Image (cartoon, rainbow, N blue to C red):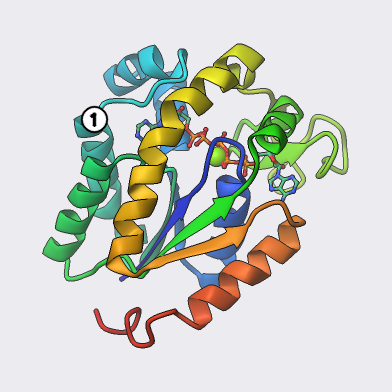
Amino acid sequence: MKVYVMIGAPGAGKGTQAAILAQRLSLLHVASGDLFRDAVRNGTPLGREARRYMDRGALVPDPVVIGMIEERLDQPDAAAGVILDGFPRTRPQAEALDAALAQRGARVDAALYVGVSEEELIRRLSARWVCRAAGHPYNERSHPPQVPGVCDLDGSQLYQRDDDRPETVRARLAQQLPPMYEVIDYYTTQGVLVAVDGAQPVEAVTEALLSAIAHPARPGRSEAA
Ligand code: AP5
Ligand code: MG
């Protein structure tokens, strides 16, 4: 099982890149935020709990997230491998992921960090639209849909996320960047971190990520498991 982790601040382009990489590498795209948004929409107990945190830009507690992701990893469509988008977001989540993967005979092959300045993050999120069916992201400025308000990929309606309001974006950055840097440190220590410049056009970011995956910094590391 191949496992790639996407790391990046809110709006860095994790979802954009994870969707492309999943297709190019024939892996399953698992986005923790999308799983929570589905649960919120369906009014499940998980959704009700997650919403309390998401609405104020806070992280959902580790045990809730870890349980949800482990369940998802056990579905048959995850057997070949996954691109995790938005998980892990804290050091305890990263440790729990390692333990869960070890039990399944796998490990994180590469942690892909997409770096973008805070100014640009705010610009991107205020202009973002995502689709109802699968959360495919668009941008009024950099990536508009072919037909306004309609997803190019699945035809579903586009909407703006509640947590993309400016005050919630500020809260997300303030609360979520410090734990993200701990996760980056964690994977740096393990020797699996790859950092790419996320300010480049989408296609250039994708090529940088694919080339890093194809030529790991520590040869053999990604083949070992
Ligand atoms: P989540 O849905 O993961 O949100 P996030 O991390 O804040 O990230 P975003 O989805 O906002 O941004 P993205 O990096 O995917 O960027 P995108 O590709 O859309 O999480 C939501 C909430 O759920 C969290 O706040 C938390 O409460 C909870 N949660 C989730 N996971 C959790 C966890 N593990 N632990 C605890 N809580 C958790 O791109 C953004 C915009 O930029 C788009 O408009 C896009 O078109 C545009 N764009 C992308 N790339 C480029 C580019 N290269 N150039 C120009 N524009 C670009
Ligand atoms: Mg996303």
Q: Is residue 110 left or right of residue 159?
A: left
* Picture residue at 67% right of the left edge, 40% below the top: 137
Q: Image quadrant for the N terminus? A: bottom left
* Picture residue at 43% right of the left edge, 31% below the top: 176
* Picture residue at 59% right of the left edge, 61% below the top: 196
Q: Quadrant of residue 3?
A: bottom left
Looking at the image, which is closer to me, 221 or 223? 221
Relative vertical location of residue 164 with respect to residue 99 in this rendering, above or below: above
Residue 76 rendering spot, x and y as whole percentages = 30, 59
Residue 114 rendering spot, x and y as whole percentages = 56, 53
Q: How many marks?
A: 1
Q: Is residue 180 left or right of residue 225?
A: right
Q: Quadrant of residue 136?
A: top right
| Residue type at the position of mark 1 | Val
Residue sitting at the far left: 103
Q: Is residue 88 visible?
A: no
Q: Is residue 178 left or right of residue 157?
A: left
